[in-house]
Image: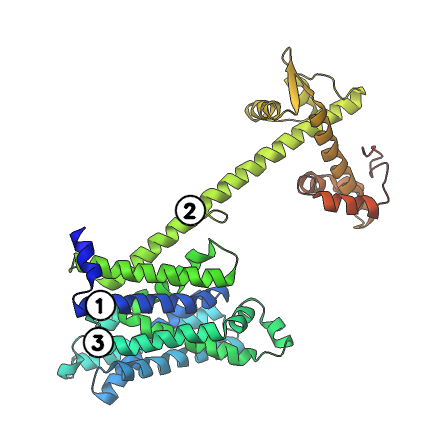
């Protein structure tokens, strides 16, 4: 607890520089990464991250210093150039985008390693620490670095805020944006530039190798919590900021622990948690929804078969044994018994002397499922021109998801038919 209080007291200027820098870099990268993620260009971040290394090395060779401004300019030039080359290869050749990304990533990174090796053997004392760009070294951020990277991070956030609607539109439907008269190519160029800048700023904290994770992971995690792009962007920024703050705190508590990798570890943990527990898209939630849907289909199929048995005997409310039901339609015995108990609890059937029969509510529900099944069969046969012998399987699925509104439209479209394609009566 004392360590936590000391950390948040920000009494040490170096702690302030590292913490603020990590939060700004992580949050700004996450915001830009949201649109990269939505455009399904997750690998682009990795390509840019590896392509900035030769730019950093060339900037150092030409300037002779590790001034962050010169390094950013050099990194931006080669990072942006790599994306231009990837786009041109994809558009003008038969090479697919993923192949072009792998090609450019490898070539640029190889050139960067060659230049870095040359610098290390040049005897220039100023090159000390330049290799930290490979794996990141947020703890090396000083006041001067913080000023430059902080300005770039603010530029990124402000630019996204100003062009949010346009970026959102080209991320989802570039053709529609073009039809509206928006400068799609210009906006693509802007997003490309923002992506490169985000990578360039974040690379100081997490390095070339891990930067793609910092760009994409917060957006991927936020996507599990919402369908609203605005909320998703804010969530991604918060998750990125929290991971940056937490990574800086871990490094403060355990100085041997590197800040950058811990930032990535924490955002990955947040993403993994989101994948499982997000209320609508999470794996657990979707598993529960799928199980609930399977139970609903099982219950409705059972009520439907009870109605079919009643039609055959001209006695809808006749009590049926499990054997009779299975003879009409096969159900696994354990699932059948679970469904019968569930329907009984819900008031759709009752049990009398070991046999099962409809309640009035059960009869109405079973009749509606049969009605929807036969209406859909007739629709497929009449309007889709599908042979009556081939409509049953499709109707078996659709009958469970037809809404009351669609049911009314079907009735009106088919002019309230009395029989289905198999000459079976449609109950109303």
Percent position of residue 213, x then y: 36, 62
Residue 18 visible in the current orientation: yes
Quarter of the picture containing the C terminus is top right
- Provide the residue designation for mark 1: 16
Instruction: Say whether disc 3 or disc 1 marks the residue closer to the N-terminus.
Output: 1
Percent position of residue 370, x then y: 74, 33
**Picture residue at 27% right of the left edge, 58% below the top:** 246
Q: Say if 166 sits above or below 366 in the image.
A: below
* Mark 2 surroundings within 10 Å by alpha-carbon count, few (fewer than 14), some (14 through 19), many (20 or more): some
**Picture residue at 78% right of the left edge, 44% below the top:** 408
Mark seen at residue 143 = 3
Please, what secondary structure does the residue beneath circle 1 have? helix
Instruction: Give the CA distance from mark 1 to mark 2.
Output: 34 Å
Q: How is the image coloured?
A: rainbow
- Provide the residue designation for mark 2: 276
Residue 106 visible in the current orientation: no
Please, what secondary structure does the residue beneath circle 2 have? helix
Q: Nearer the viewer, mark 1 or mark 2?
A: 1
Please, what secondary structure does the residue beneath circle 3 have? helix
* Mark 1 surroundings within 10 Å by alpha-carbon count, few (fewer than 14), some (14 through 19), many (20 or more): many
Q: Say if 273 sits above or below 309 in the image.
A: below
Q: Is residue 228 left or right of residue 179?
A: left
**Picture residue at 66% right of the left edge, 32% below the top:** 300
Q: Quadrant of residue 172?
A: bottom right
Percent position of residue 158, x then y: 42, 75
Q: Nearer the viewer, residue 218 or 228?
A: 228
């Amino acid at each position: 607890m004392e360590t936590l209080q000391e950390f948040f007291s920000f009494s040490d200027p170096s702690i302030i520089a590292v913490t603020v820098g990590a939060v700004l870099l992580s949050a700004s990268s996450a915001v830009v990464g949201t649109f990269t993620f939505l455009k399904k260009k997750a690998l682009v971040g990795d390509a840019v991250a590896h392509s900035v290394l030769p730019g950093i090395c060339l900037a150092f060779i030409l300037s002779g210093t590790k001034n962050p401004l010169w390094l950013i300019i050099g990194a931006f030039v080669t990072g942006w150039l790599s994306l231009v080359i990837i786009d041109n290869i994809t558009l003008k050749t038969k090479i697919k985008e993923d192949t072009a990304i792998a090609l450019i990533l490898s070539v640029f990174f190889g050139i960067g390693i060659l230049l870095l090796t040359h610098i290390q053997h040049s005897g220039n004392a100023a090159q000390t620490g330049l290799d930290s760009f490979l794996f990141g070294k947020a703890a090396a951020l000083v006041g001067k670095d913080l000023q430059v990277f902080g300005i770039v991070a603010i530029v990124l956030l402000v630019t996204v805020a100003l062009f949010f609607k346009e970026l959102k539109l080209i991320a989802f439907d570039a053709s529609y944006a073009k039809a509206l008269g928006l400068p799609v190519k210009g906006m693509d160029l802007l997003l490309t530039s923002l992506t490169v800048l985000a990578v360039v700023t974040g690379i100081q904290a997490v390095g070339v190798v891990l930067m793609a994770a910092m760009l994409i992971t917060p957006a991927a995690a936020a996507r599990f919590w919402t369908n609203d792009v605005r909320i998703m962007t804010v969530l991604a920024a918060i998750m990125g900021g929290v991971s940056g703050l937490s990574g800086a705190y871990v490094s403060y508590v355990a100085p041997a622990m590197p800040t950058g990798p811990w930032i990535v570890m924490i955002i990955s943990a947040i993403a993994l948690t989101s994948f499982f527990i997000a209320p609508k898209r999470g794996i657990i939630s979707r598993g529960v929804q799928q199980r609930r849907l399977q139970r609903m289909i099982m219950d409705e199929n059972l009520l439907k078969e009870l109605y079919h048995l009643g039609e055959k005997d001209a006695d809808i409310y006749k009590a049926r044994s499990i054997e009779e039901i299975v003879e009409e339609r096969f159900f696994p015995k354990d699932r059948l018994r679970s469904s019968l108990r569930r329907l009984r609890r819900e008031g759709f059937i009752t049990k009398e002397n070991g046999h099962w029969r409809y309640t009035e509510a059960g009869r109405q529900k079973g009749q509606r499922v049969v009605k929807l099944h036969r209406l859909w069969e007739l629709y497929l046969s009449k309007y889709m021109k599908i042979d009556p012998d081939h409509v049953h399987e499709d109707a078996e699925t659709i009958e469970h998801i037809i809404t009351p509104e669609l049911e009314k439209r079907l009735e009106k479209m088919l002019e309230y038919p009395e029989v289905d394609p198999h000459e079976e009566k449609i109950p109303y």
